[in-house]
Every structure is written in C-alpha cells, then in structure tokens.
Amino acid sequence: MKCPFCGDQESKVVDSRHSEDGLSIRRRRECLNCQRRFTTYEVVESLPIIVVKRDGSRQSFDRNKLLNSMVRAFDKRQVTTAELERIATEIEQSIQNTLEREVSTDRIGEMVMERLKPLDEVAYIRFASVYRRFQDVRSFIHEINSFLEKK
C-alpha cells in the first residue's frame, strides 16, 4: 500500500476492524519509511449487474427499484424497512454470487416472490399480481389457488 505522505510502498498493518455494516474492513497502517499512520478500507469489488427487461432492453440493476416494488406490495402491512432492506441485500448478493453479469427481470421477480411468500401472504399476492401481470379475476384466483395448494 502506497503511503499518502511519502509515497513509499512498504507499510505494515497495526490494527484491523470490521466496519459497522460488515461489508468492509478498516485497517490502520504504518509506513515503514516515515513512520506515519494512515487508514485504508478493504471492500469486496462488485461488478455491475445488467437487468434484461421483458422487452429485451437492458439497464443497470437498481436496488431502489427493487425496494420500491416491495414497499408497494407491503402497503398497510406490518413489515419493517430493515426487513425489506435485508431481502434486497440478500437478492443483490445472490445475483452477485452467480457471477453472471446479466439477469432477467423474471429471475429477479421469482427471487422476490420466494422471499415474500413466507413473510406475508397478502404482500406475496400483491407482488405476484403486478409481476405476473394478471389481466382478469380468473388469473388472480388461479394464483391464490396455486398458493393455497402449495401451502
């Protein structure tokens, strides 16, 4: 690690701690040349995720869109923002772990539904109605019946 004071390449780590969010490591280093101390942060590099929409267009993954869709499904339901954040983080990390750079909106929708189903049945049905584009009452009833059969 290059010293920000003298530019020397040699330093030693004198202290390491996990950050509060657990996503990075804070390291205190001491330059072996000038003996001054400085702080570095080590984080996992995440590659950009491209979302392939139903019409074939592509755009960057937007965590806020994912959160907003879940917030709408949970309208007037009992769920904490922290729980929705946890689900969004879980989905994003799952996508990152596949090492695939492109993911379809269909796959993201299925991942959301897998996590909503055990959490809140009403929110699950609300999300499914938008995600699966129910056109009439029959398709809505069909989804509820298949939900009840699997329960």
Image (cartoon, grey):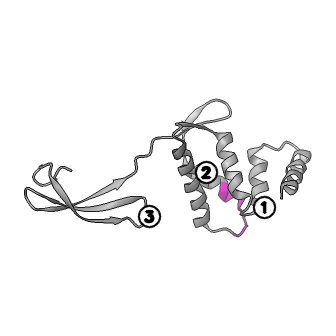
**Mark 3 or mark 1, earlier in chain:** 3
Q: Nearer the viewer, residue 42 or 79?
A: 42
Give the alpha-carbon distance from disc 1 to disc 2, as whole Å.
Answer: 18 Å
Task: Please name the amino acid that badge 2 sits on.
Answer: Leu
Left/right placement of residue 57 relative to residue 27 reads right
- Toward the left, the furthest residue is 34
Q: Which mark is residue 66?
A: 2
Residue assigned mark 3: 21
- Toward the right, the furthest residue is 138
Residue assigned mark 1: 121
Q: Nearer the viewer, residue 134 or 32?
A: 32
Position in image of residue 74 (x %, y %) = 71, 61
Task: Please name the amino acid that badge 3 sits on.
Answer: Asp
Circle 2/circle 3 CB separation < 8 Å: no
Q: Secondary structure at mark 3?
A: loop
Where 85 sits versus 104, above or below? below
